[in-house]
Amino acid sequence: MKRYYAVIYSLLLIGLTHNACYASQLIKPLVLNTIQGKTIHTQKKITYLKFWATWCRYCIEEMPHLQKTANTKREQTHVVSINVGLNQSPQLVSRFLSQYNYTFPTVFDDGSLVERFKITGTPIHIIIDKQGNIIHRSALLTDELKAKLLDLTTQGKYHE
């Protein structure tokens, strides 16, 4: 059992190190089509992306926070969930969201966003500023992520 936890811990550290390499990276604006039938253009608006899957325990545990963030930051930022879609369908994801009354915009990824952002596991949280710079990337819901999201509605450095 100890070996199992050591392997999990090592994979998490590799993921966190891998994710840190992408902070401050400039990306082109995104055009995202949601399963709710909306199109989101990320240009000139702060964007919070959460990559997740219905089978990911940590992802599911973080969903209430994502909904709260979507409800409270709607004016300042795009909050978008990106379902990685492995062995799933848009219908399955829609049923999952409806079951828990989640209303945040959700994209069913065909693999292009996973490839573009070099996603190697779930969950992954990414914040992109108005200029298209990745200002945060983490594997889990961290205190640093919460602080940056809180700062989006204040006069802090992420509020523009």
Image (cartoon, helix red, strand yellow):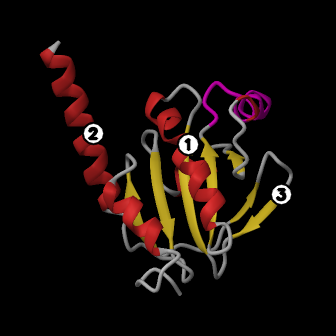
Question: What's drawn in magenta, residue-wise?
Answer: 85-97
Q: Quadrant of residue 9?
A: top left
Question: What residue did someone put label 2 on?
Answer: 12
Q: Which residue is mark 3?
A: 38
Where is residue 25 shown, x and y percent of the image? Answer: 42, 72
Q: In the image, residue 118 lies at what x, y percent?
A: 46, 52
What amino acid type is highlighted by mark number 1?
A: Pro
Predominant secondary structure, magenta span: helix
Q: Residue at x 47, y 59 (%)?
A: 126
Identify which amino acid the numbered label 3 is placed on. Answer: Lys
Q: Residues within 10 Å of mark 2 (few under 14, many from 20)?
A: some
Mark 2 or mark 3, earlier in chain: 2
Image point (60%, 30%), residue name: 86
Vertical position of residue 127 compared to residue 6: above or below: below
129 lies above or below 37: below
- Using the image, determine if residue 36 lies above or below residue 43: above
Residue 118 in sight here: no
| Residue 146 in sight from this viewpoint | yes
- Does the magenta segment cover residue 88? yes
Residue 64: give its label.
1
Report how far apart the C-alphas of labels 1 and 2 lie in the structure: 23 Å
Q: If the image is split into quadrants, where does the N terminus sit? A: top left
Question: Residue at coordinates 40% horizontally, 49% vertically from top-left?
Answer: 141
Question: What SS does tag 3 mark?
Answer: loop
Q: Are marks 1 and 2 in contact (CB under 8 Å)?
A: no
Closer mark to the observer between disc 1 and disc 2: 1
**Which dot, 3 or 1, sits closer to the camera?**
1
Q: 10 Å neighbourhood of mark 3: few (<14), some, or many (≥20)? A: few
Q: Is residue 9 left or right of residue 43?
A: left
